[in-house]
Each structure stands twice: as structure tokens, then as C-alpha cells.
Amino acid sequence: MKYIISGGGTGGHIFPAVSIANALREADPNCEILFVGALGRMEMERVPQAGYKIIGLPVKGFDRSRPWKNIRVMIDLIRSMIQARKIVRDFRPDVGIGVGGYASGAAMKVAAKMGVPILLQEQNGFAGVTNKLLKDDAKKICVAYEGMERFFPKDKIILTGNPVRQNLTSGTKEEAIKYFNEEFDVNFTTEKKTLLIIGGSLGARTINQSIIAHLNELIQSGIQVIWQTGKNYFADCQTALEEYNSKFKIQNSKFICTDFVSQMPLAYALADLVISRAGASSISELCLLGKPSILVPSPNVAEDHQTHNAMALVKKDAAVLVKDADAKDALIATALPLIKDDKQLESLHKNILKLSLPDSAKHIAQEVMKLAKK
């Protein structure tokens, strides 16, 4: 069997795409998989790192603030559809899988017109533009949230959840303590509560500013902190922490500030509470692991996806929401009482675990193979 997987632009699209490819390869080691992405976007680097071939299209997103620039965008879209037609004709896929993003729109539209059955995977609680445009071409649409009939035909929807990174559940608290103490020269223990702060690989300005503004309260609280700043903000965050330590002449043995946590399974294993953006992949990981969390949706994403994602949990008492605009004042003021409230932490843990949909990638792969056999 041959499969084309198309989409990308962000980790939220790429992680599920690679997970689906891995599940297909595990079920059928002899299958052939080809990715189609957008030139210059993250997938052109990440997909080959995962061991898959990818072809890039010159497609770009529409510029809503400067409409005159869209003439070039339309030319690139036409070029992309011509190239996509050649890719489909040469590769002859049995099924096309669209995960959202610019490239997915061009590749899946062409594939459907050429008679290839299409399956879409929608990560968010508010459907993306590309998948909404492709809904009539798709045979099946795999979603992560209930109530997606607002966007897609009910008879096509399958609730599968979002695939997450492999090996996320590996690691114990003891292993995590050993790793972080050795790697970051701290003195973490299993007796202290641990707060994990993550804002994505690039970082989240508002979350980082909120931490900097309340370093004193965090440090004086006595909890352990793992603060992943993202590479864009690491220098400023590290400087702020060093200035605090110098001012009060202390050596922080319970506070880690780093641009990137390479061992996320261990960070999750140690965390009693997580502060995070509300991207689809992040929420799926938190659900799978049953982690109590405070979600700070990014205001800078299309159609306010992250707020919709977060509210799906908040409405079921499975997470706490702090708005981005309120974060500087409210985030740490919310986090510190919560992390010390064992009863509320346990309630959040139980409620978010109910929303977990494990083995999502395998379920999606099964649906793909059913289409291929038809």
C-alpha cells in the first residue's frame, strides 16, 4: 500500500502526521509513505529527521492584513496544485491523509479529484480552514473533540483523539529526580511539589513575563520549578533569574531555567502541576498523562483555536483557564494555591484522564487501511 501524508507548518500538525506514519509502518512494514509539505516550513526538516521522504510545495498562507500580496499567493497555489498533480500521478497513493496546514489543502484537493480516497485528521476543537475546505472531498474525518458536527458531516466523523509523541509515558519520578539533579546541578526531591512551565519550543512571551514578574513568590514558595522558556526568550529569562539570585545572594537548588527540556517524559513524570499553552498536541499529552494543568491559550493563533481547545477541558472541570491578557497578574496567583491543594489536584487528574483517548495513531491508521482495502 502507498500513502501520501500532507500538512504541517507547526509541531501541532507534524507530531500527529509522523505518529500516523509510524503506526502505518508498524501495521504494514512494507507500505510506502510519502510526505508533502510546504517549502520553508518546519516539516521540511522534522519529517526527514523522523525517517520519511518529503516533497515541498511553494504554497503559502493568505495574507489577511495585506490583500494585495495575495496575487503572488494565488500564483504559488496554482504552481503547487500542478506539482501536486504530478506527485499523485507518479506515486499513485492508495489513500491521502491530510493533517491541516497550507500544503494539505493543495495536495489533498488534487488527490481527491484524481480519485484517491481522503482521510482528514483535525487536531483542534475549532476546525481549521484547510480541513473545512476539504470536508466534502474526505471519506473520513478523525477528530479529537466531541461536537465537531458543527464543522463536518456527522456520518464522516470518527472520534480518535490526537496522536502524541512516542514514549511519553516512560519514566518514573525517581528517574526524573536523578536526571534533573545531574543534568542541571539542582537538589530536587520526591518530597517537594514540582511545577512544570512550558510554552512550546519557541516559547510563550506572556507566560515567561508572568514568571519573571513573580520570581520572588515562586522561589519563596518552596516548590520545585522546571521552567522551559523556549529559545526565543531564554536569554532574558536566565538574566532575570541570575539577577534575582545575585540580589538576594542565594543559590537556587530547586529552580531550573532552560530553553528546552529534551527529556519531556521525565519532566511530565515529576510534575504535580503544568502551566502550558493550549495547543492541540499539548492538551492531548496532558489528557493522556492525566496531568493537572493551568492553560493559557495563545491569542495569536487562527480563529482562536487554543481557547476552544482549553474550554473543552474547563467545561468538564479537567483544567484551569487563565486568559493571556490576565496572566501577568493571575497566573502565579492561581498556580501557587493550586499546587498545594491536593484535593483539587486529584479532582483535575481524574477529570482530565477521562478525556484521554489512547492509541489514537493506531486507530487512525486502522481507518486509513480500511479505506485502502476498499
Image: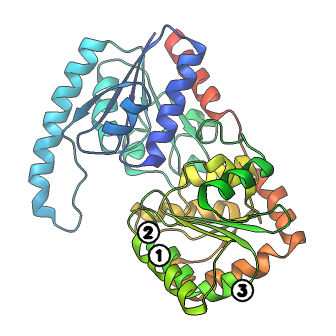
Rendered image coloring scheme: rainbow
From the top left corner, tell me how far across and down residue 354 is, in percent: 80, 50
The residue singled out by tag 2 in the image is 234
Rendered view: 27 above or below 120: above
The residue singled out by tag 1 in the image is 237
* Amino acid residing under circle 2: Phe
Residue lying furthest bottom: 247
* Amino acid residing under circle 3: Gln
How many numbered marks, from 0 up?
Answer: 3
Describe the element under mark 2 as helix, strand or loop: helix
Tell me whether circle 1 and circle 2 mark residues in contact (CB < 8 Å): yes
From the top left corner, tell me how far across and down residue 105 is, in percent: 32, 39
3D distance between C-alphas at marks 2 and 3: 22 Å
Residue that appears at 30% across and 31% down:
107
Badge 3: how crowded within 10 Å, few (<14), some, or many (20+)? few
Say which quarter of the image contains residue 168.
top right
- Which circle's residue, 2 or 3, is located before the other in the chain? 3
Residue that appears at 51% across and 80% down:
242
Describe the element under mark 3 as helix, strand or loop: helix
The disc label shown at residue 220, or none: 3
From the top left corner, tell me how far across and down residue 10 is, in percent: 40, 49
3D distance between C-alphas at marks 3 and 1: 18 Å
Q: Is residue 374 visible?
A: no
Residue lying furthest right: 343
Q: Is residue 192 visible?
A: yes
3D distance between C-alphas at marks 1 and 2: 5 Å
* Amino acid residing under circle 1: Cys
Task: Using the image as rendered, state which of residue 174 and residue 49 is in the foreground.
Answer: 174
Residue that appears at 35% across and 47% down:
9
**Side of 268 relative to 151 (left or right):** right
